[in-house]
Image: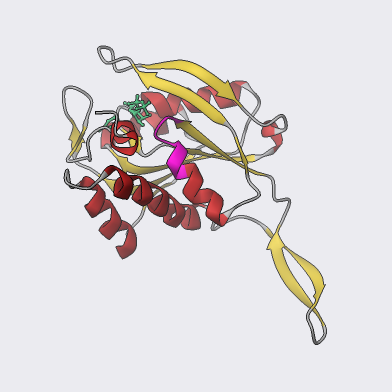
Amino acid sequence: MANVTIMDHPLIQHKIGIMRRKTTSTKEFRDLVSEVAMLICYEATRNLPLTDIEVETPLCTTKVREIEGKKLCIVPILRAGLHMADGMLNLIPNAKVGHVGLYRNEETLEPVEYFCKLPQDAANREIYVVDPMLATGGSAEAAITILKKRGIKKIHFLCLIAAPEGVERLQKAHPDVDIFIGNMDERLTENGYILPGLGDAGDRIYGTK
Ligand code: PRP
Ligand code: URA
């Protein structure tokens, strides 16, 4: 079964607390999405393999460690995942970026795919799928299924806020995918919103409501 990591770092708790407030502005909310994603990324990349190489310092030759292979790829789920990807690129600037476009049908709450564009060599890369909200889990499940159909094997999923229902669904559908969560919330409402949550992440990032 997949590993689920729930962040307990004070900076993440504090920043998500600000995001939850309905008075937080669009700009501040957007900046926080990117900052919290960066902090979660730090933990999610903890097990990347390192290799020894030799470099010349101004004084002598020495061994240093660098990330082996450097074949990473971030895949934001559109729209709201985009700003998570921006934050993560501050830490792993050479990662490639793919995009999966999904929106939830408001009645069925099931995801509808409208876009997919991945790096050509995506199947050889370690993939970080990112979306701020894991609610019913339908979008994350569908995005990862799309990636697996294209031959991608090594996948991690990062979100800022999750509902227990979404985590359970994602674990069942993709037991091989590790999940990193900023905050675990209580439950879903009957309309599929996370409680206490922070509202509609895409709308709050882009000011569309
Ligand atoms: C939101 C969110 C996730 C999805 C989560 O996107 O960013 O993609 O809902 O819900 P689920 O776990 O029940 O699938 P939305 O469909 O509102 O699209 P948007 O990002 O374009 O606003
Ligand atoms: N998508 C969001 O943006 N927020 C929720 O609470 C649930 C799904």
Which region is colored magenta? 78-84
Q: Is residue 136 magenta?
A: no
For image coordinates 67% across by 39% down, the residue present is 125
Residue closer to the observer: 18 or 111:
18
Residue 142, given in percent of the width and then of the height, sits at 46, 22
Q: Quadrant of the C terminus?
A: top left
- Describe residue 13's horizontal placement relative to residue 171 as left or right: left
For image coordinates 66% across by 49% down, the residue present is 94
Furthest residue in direction top, as rendered: 107
From where the camera sits, is residue 1 visible? Answer: no
From where the camera sits, is residue 39 visible? Answer: yes
Indicate which quadrant contains ligand 2. top left
Kindly indicate the quadrant of the structure image that contains residue 62.
bottom right
Residue 155, given in percent of the width and then of the height, sits at 55, 38
Residue closer to the observer: 156 or 13:
13
Up-down relation of residue 199 to residue 149 (above or below): below
Up-down relation of residue 161 to residue 80 (above or below): below
Residue 200, given in percent of the width and then of the height, sits at 26, 32
- Describe residue 112's horizontal placement relative to residue 128 as left or right: left
Kindly indicate the quadrant of the structure image that contains residue 52.
bottom right
Instruction: Give the total of numbered labels.
Output: 0
Residue 21, given in percent of the width and then of the height, sits at 18, 47
Q: Quadrant of the N terminus?
A: top left
Q: Colour mode?
A: secondary structure
For image coordinates 23% across by 53% down, the residue present is 18
For image coordinates 33% across by 62% down, the residue present is 11
Up-down relation of residue 189 to residue 10 (above or below): above
Q: Is residue 82 magenta?
A: yes
